[in-house]
Amino acid sequence: MWKEPDAAHEVSSSEWENVMHHNENTPVVAVPNIDLARYVGSWFEICRLPLKWEDAAASDITATYSQTADGRIRVENRCLDKDGKPDRSIGLAVPQDASNAKLKVSFLPEYLRWIPFTQGDYWVLAIDPDYTVALVGTPDREHLWLIARTAALPSEVVENYLAVAKTQGFDLGRLITPRQSGHMVPDTAFEA
C-alpha cells in the first residue's frame, strides 16, 4: 500500500504554513529528520528536472547510497545513456547538520572534494514513513528528483509528491520521466 508523503506531519505547522503559501522569497523546507540507516540502499529515478550533466534520454537511472564508517554517504548513480551504453558516477554526500535531511554531494575525484563550490545541495523534501518514496531537491529550486525503491509508482502517488514540489515553488514544466525497465544496470555492464 502506497502512503502519502510524510512532509505534512514531518514539518512543523509554521514551516508547513510557509510552504503552502509559497512565494519566491519563501525558503525551501526539508523534512526535519532522516534516518540514514533506513535511507541507504537503491532507489529508482521516477522523474526529475533536467540536469546539464545527465543525458536527457538516459534510462534505467538508479542511485545507490551506502553509509561509510565515518558517517558520510557513498553515492553511486547508474544509467544507460541514449545509445544504451552503461554509465555511472560515484560521489560522496556529507550531512550538513544533525537532521541528516540536508546533504552536500560531490562527484569530483576524492582529492578535489574539499573544494567548497564543487559540492551540490541534496535536500530531502518529503518521504513516506516506510522510506520507499522520496522527493529530493535543492534550495535554489533548480534540481528535483522523485525517487522510489521500485521502478514505477501509481500515478496518484507521483501526483501527490509533485504537489509537494509545486507548493515549495518548483517549476515542473520541464519535468523528465526516464524510461525504466525495472532492472538496475548490473556490475557486469562495467567490466571491460
Image (cartoon, helix red, strand yellow):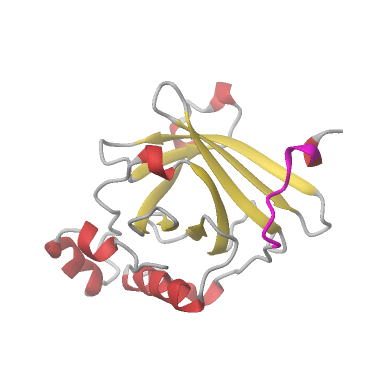
Give the residue furthest to the front. 1
Q: Is residue 185 magenta?
A: yes
| Image x and y of residue 66, in percent | 50, 34
| Image x and y of residue 21, in percent | 22, 75
Task: Say which of 126 and 106 sits in front.
Answer: 126
Q: Which quadrant: the N terminus?
A: bottom left
> Looking at the picture, does residue 127 appear above or below residue 89?
below
Q: Is residue 14 left or right of residue 43?
A: left
Q: For residue 57, what is the image quadrant? A: bottom right
Q: Residue drawn 21% across and 62% down? A: 9
Q: For residue 178, what is the image quadrant? A: bottom right
Task: Say which of 94 and 174 sits in front.
Answer: 94
Q: Residue drawn 57% across and 58% down? A: 45
Q: Is residue 25 magenta?
A: no
Q: Main secondary structure of the magenta part?
A: loop
Q: Residue drawn 48% across and 29% down? A: 115
| Image x and y of residue 150, in percent | 56, 59
Q: Which quadrant: the C terminus?
A: top right
Give, as a single range, the part of the protein colored magenta.
Answer: 181-188
Task: Say which of 151 and 163 sits in front.
Answer: 151
Q: For residue 84, what is the image quadrant? A: bottom right
How many badges with numbers are in the image?
A: 0
Q: Residue drawn 42% across and 44% down? A: 39
Q: Is residue 10 left or right of residue 70?
A: left
